[in-house]
Image: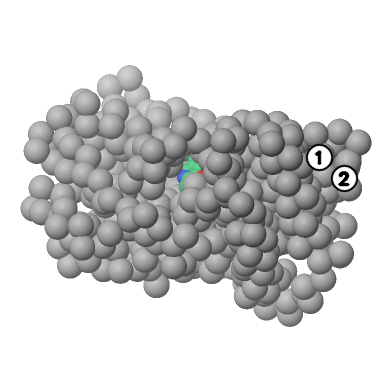
Amino acid sequence: MESDIQADSKIKTERSKRTFNIDEIRNEFPILKRTVNGKQLVYFDNAATTQKPQSVIDEIAHYYTFENANIHRGLHFLSEVATESYEQARLKVKEYINALSVSEILFVRGATEAINLLANTMCRAGMFGEDAEIIISQMEHHANIVPWQLMCERKGAQLKVIPIDDNGDLIMDEYEKLISEKTKLVSVVHTSNSLGTINPVKEIIDIAHKNGIPVLIDGSQAVQHQKIDVQELDCDYFVFSGHKMYGPTGIGVLYGKTEMLDKLPPYQGGGDMIRTVTFEETTFDDLPNKFEAGTPNIAGGIGLGKAIDYIRSFDMNDIIAHENKLLDYATEQVQKIDGLKIIGTAKEKCSVLSFVLDGIHPYDIGTIIDTDGIAIRTGHHCTQPIMQRYDLPATSRASFSFYNTTEEVDKFIVGLKKVISMFK
Ligand SMILES: Cc1ncc(COP(=O)(O)O)c(C=O)c1O
């Protein structure tokens, strides 16, 4: 069956790419037409979650209207249709990140669950002894800190942290110094949700591999902004969430090389992940089923597949160029504001702009600017160690997607100036 699906999907992906037309694109995201507090919505909270195109919304409705059935288990028509749609989605993910095989693509709830799955199963596989060390970085999302901490508590292992400099770049010399024969895993974020830093992940992976250490990449803020090729990166694991790439919530991906996933025990037990069950013993199914116990988020998987179709209908270089233009323009505009400091000025950045304003708490900025229909995020962005690094309680963050415009950036700048004038 896989080869039929593969052939079908190849035909689809060989289609020519769409012209990047911003009006057309905005029209495809129904929520962008709505007003908030009587103003046209300006949505700059894309690092938290992205909006959904009509095609993704329709696909989910289509599934529930015409295809709804449980997958993998039934021989009846609807079960086969639903199974086919769900497995097509897995194939789309495989092609999107260029994995070697569909069995390396595990559907999970999101990046958080993917990392918890790994921490849990690696721990049960006995990969972390008492003096084991795991290297993470100072710019990790809590999702790539807390699961490892919980695991360390159980096993007595230790976290080692790669520091960042004032710009928000990783200090690579320090990374190399942290590596030792005790290091059992390197787990780092590809692109920071708080600072926008794009890390030199290929270099990080190569250094770890030279020392025989596997690497997990948290790609939650990367998959929607740049081309990802897991074979080229040669990472051992790669995780991300569907909802940050125009897909639904409650679905995400754990990619793992077959030889790595084969070494791990199942995460949860239940239906669909077994081969045989007796009261004495259970044998487990092959990848990816071994890690997918119970009825999965079928509609979510199918919706994610449609989101991938949507992204792939564009040339990724057009998306990158537009988002870079927005970041450059917004950076240039905010730099003209007295008392505003950008937090995160790394050499390589994605379209995330975090900042603080002298004498004005980020929560006030977020609340006041919302009255003009402008959605930005304020707080620690689930990266409290970054706030500690810069000695800040919080920042304000505008994060852009390819459906945003420079006109929206202008509205945001007017909004910021209004906040400042209210505090004068
Ligand atoms: C870099 C990064 N990693 C992990 C996560 C966790 O994603 P989720 O909450 O979808 O599991 C996020 C979410 O903001 C993130 O930005």
Q: Is residue 18 visible?
A: yes
User: Left or right: where does residue 18 sit relative to residue 174?
Assistant: right
Residue tagged by mark 2? 40
Dividing the picture into quarters, in which one does residue 179 lie?
bottom left
> Are there few (<14), some (14-19), or many (20+) residues within 10 Å of tag 2?
some
Label 1 and label 2: CA atoms lie apart by 6 Å
Residue 90 on image: x %, y %: 56, 54
Which color scheme does this rendered protein use?
Answer: one colour
Q: How many marks?
A: 2
Residue 407 on image: x %, y %: 81, 60
The amino acid type of the residue labelled 2 equals: Gln
Q: Secondary structure beneath disc 1?
A: loop
> Are there few (<14), some (14-19), or many (20+) residues within 10 Å of tag 1?
many
Q: Is residue 255 visible?
A: no
Query: Which residue lies at the image location 55% right of the left edge and 41% below the top edge?
Result: 358
Query: Which residue lies at the image location 16% right of the left edge and 53% below the top edge?
Result: 178
Residue 22 on image: x %, y %: 81, 66
Query: Which residue lies at the image location 82% right of the left edge and 39% below the top edge?
Result: 372
Quadrant location of the C terminus? Answer: top right
Q: Is residue 17 above or below residue 171?
A: below
Mark 1 and 2 residues: CB-CB less than 8 Å, in contact?
Answer: yes
Residue tagged by mark 1? 373
